[in-house]
Image (spheres, helix red, strand yellow):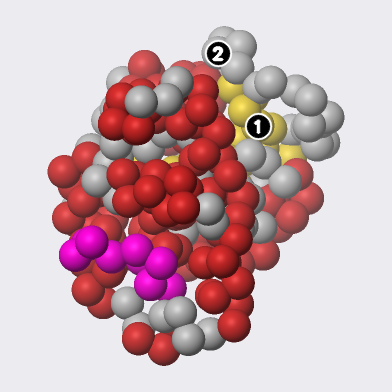
Amino acid sequence: MRNTKLPTSKLSTAARLIIVDDHDMAREGLRDMLADVPDIEVIGEASNGKEALVLCSMLRPDLALMDVRMPEMDGLLATSKIKQSHPEISILMVTMHENPEYLFEALKAGAAGYVLKDASRQEVIDAVRQVRLGESPLDPDLASRLLRRIAAESTPGRRLSGGENRHRFDKLTRRELEVLGLLKEGMTNRQIAGVLFVSPGTAKNHVEHIITKLGVSDRTQAVVRALEIGIIDFNS
C-alpha cells in the first residue's frame, strides 16, 4: 500500500483518486497516464482490496480506480465494503473485458462505471472527469440493460414499505423524480436540459440534489438506489 499524500482541502478542484491493482506495472501505467493532468491527483495506491479499504479510510479520496481481479479481496467485494463505509467515494472498475456479468455485479456493489485495461489515456481521463462532473461513463444502451436487470431482481422487502425508504422518497421533489426518470434512460445533463427546457446548469443542480438526498456518490448509483427501493421503475 502506498500512501502518497494526506487529505487536502475540500476547496481543491482536482479530483483526488487512488489506484488499486495487484500488478505493479498496471498501477504504474495508470499513474503515468494521470501524472500531468491538472484536475486529477493520484494520492495513493493499493495492491488489493483490503489495502484499498485502509487507504480509503485514511485518505478519503474522491474516486478509486479499482481492479476487478485481485488476491486477498477482489474489487467487487472491496467496492461493496468501501461504499458501505464511505458512500461518498466514487469507484470506477478497471477490467480486461466488457463482461456484462461483472458489470452487473459492479453496479450492484456500488460502482459508478468502468474503464477497460487497454483504454487510451484520454479514455481514462474522460471517464474520471465524467464521474466527477456528475455524468455517467457508461454506454447508455449497456447501462439501460444493466439497470433493467437490477430493477427486475430487486428484493421486494427493500421497496417503499420501509420507513427509511419512504423518507428518501418524500425528500425528492416532483421535478427531481422527473429527472430520475430521465437518468434511468441514460440521458446526459445536456439532454435532460433539452427535455425539460431548462439550462444544463439547472439540470446538473437537480442531479446533484438527487445524489445528495439518496446518499450516493454519483448518478449511476442514484438510479440503482432508486430502482432498488422502488422510487422509480422501468414501467413508468
In percent of width and height, residue 110 lies at 46, 59
Lower sequence index among marks 2 and 1: 1
- Looking at the rendered structure, the secondary structure element under dot 2 is loop
- What residue is drawn where x is 53% and y is 85%? 162
Dominant secondary-structure state across the stretch colored magenta: loop
Which segment did they paint magenta?
227-236
183 or 98: nearer the viewer: 183
Task: Answer above or below: position of 199 versus 141.
Answer: above
221 sits to left or right of 61 = left
Q: Position of residue 44 (x, y in %)?
A: 67, 37
Relative image position of residue 208 (x, y in whole percent): 56, 40
Residue that mark 2 sits on: 37
Label 1, residues with CA under 10 Å away: few <14, some 14-19, many ≥20: many
- Give the secondary structure at mark 1: strand
Q: Is residue 103 magenta?
A: no
Q: Mark 1 = which residue?
A: 16
